[in-house]
DNA sequence: TGGGCGATTCGCT
DNA sequence: GCGAATCGCCCAC
């Protein structure tokens, strides 16, 4: 089932685990979401924690849109804006299991190893061809295509990766046992 | 107005 | 394991 904007108009803590097993395509390239992290404006690791700036403005807008920011001056990271307008919460998409548009993704990533295509937030945006041009784009319209998961899947949770604030919050979610995680979950 | 630092990745040791 | 690449934001001067 195709995900509409209303899917995202709920608590980020409901949406994030439900995105595991969903399918994300961009211009026909992408795959199954196997790892995400939730960020909420009330918690200091979120970009929106300190209030609205030109960079994070999309986070303060309505849910169901893409927030894309530059990480370490090099990579692009893709988020889905959640909750009601002004809540400024989002889900960071961290890893996909590649499924569609494999040739294009291998070309953009310059690797033959399928596990290096989309296993990391910077890697998956490069594989799909997502940049700041997509900041503020609707998620329920081309070139984005999002489908809800079709069957049951086992979701595991743990602490988020690569942050220095609010490190203890277990807001990283993953597909149990997936070989395409950016890092394994602690057993 | 400038220096430090971050939701990262890659290559070399 | 460690450090470099590199851009925008933020806080201290």
Image: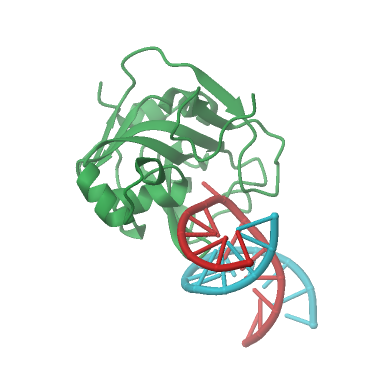
Chain colours: A green, B red, C cyan
Say left or right for A165 vs A174. right
Is A172 drawn above or below residue A127 in the view shown? above
Is A139 drawn above or below residue A170 in the view shown? below
Count all numbered tags in the image, as a single digit. Answer: 0
Q: Nearer the viewer, residue B7 or A34?
A: A34
Q: Residue A6's spot in the image, x, y percent? A: 35, 27
Q: Nearer the viewer, residue A34 or A63?
A: A34
Residue at 34% over, 41% down: A114
Q: Which quadrant does the C terminus of chain A fall into?
A: top right
Residue at 35% over, 54% down: A126
Say left or right for C3 vs A2. right
User: Do we see residue A67 in this rendering?
Assistant: no
Determine the residue located farthest toward the top in the rendered image: A152
Q: Quadrant of residue A96?
A: top left
Residue at 31% over, 16% down: A150
Q: Residue A80's spot in the image, x, y percent? A: 41, 40
Q: Quadrant of residue A98?
A: top left
Is A108 drawn above or below residue A143 in the view shown? below
User: Do we see residue A156 in this rendering?
Assistant: yes
Q: Residue A97's spot in the image, x, y percent? A: 36, 34
Q: Residue A60's spot in the image, x, y percent? A: 48, 47
Say left or right for A64 vs C7. left
Is A40 drawn above or below residue B2 in the view shown? above
Q: Which quadrant does the N terminus of chain A fall into?
A: top left
Say left or right for A137 vs A54. left
């Amino acid at each position: 089932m195709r995900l509409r904007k209303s899917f995202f108009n709920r608590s980020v803590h409901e949406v994030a685990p439900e995105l595991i097993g969903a399918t994300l395509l961009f211009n026909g390239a992408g795959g199954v979401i196997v790892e995400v992290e939730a960020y909420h404006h009330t918690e200091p690791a979120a970009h929106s924690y300190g209030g609205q700036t030109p960079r994070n403005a999309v986070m303060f807008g309505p849910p169901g849109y893409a927030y894309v920011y530059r990480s370490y001056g090099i990579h692009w990271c893709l988020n889905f804006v959640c909750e009601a307008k002004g809540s400024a919460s989002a889900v960071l998409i961290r890893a996909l299991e590649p499924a569609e548009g494999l040739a294009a993704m291998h070309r953009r990533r310059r690797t033959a190893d399928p596990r290096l295509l989309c296993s990391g937030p910077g890697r998956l945006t490069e594989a799909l061809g997502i940049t700041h041009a997509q900041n503020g784009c609707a998620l329920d319209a081309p070139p984005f295509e999002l489908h809800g998961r079709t069957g049951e899947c086992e979701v595991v949770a743990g602490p988020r990766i690569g942050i220095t604030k609010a490190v203890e919050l277990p807001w990283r979610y993953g597909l149990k046992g997936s070989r395409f995680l950016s890092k394994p979950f602690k057993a």
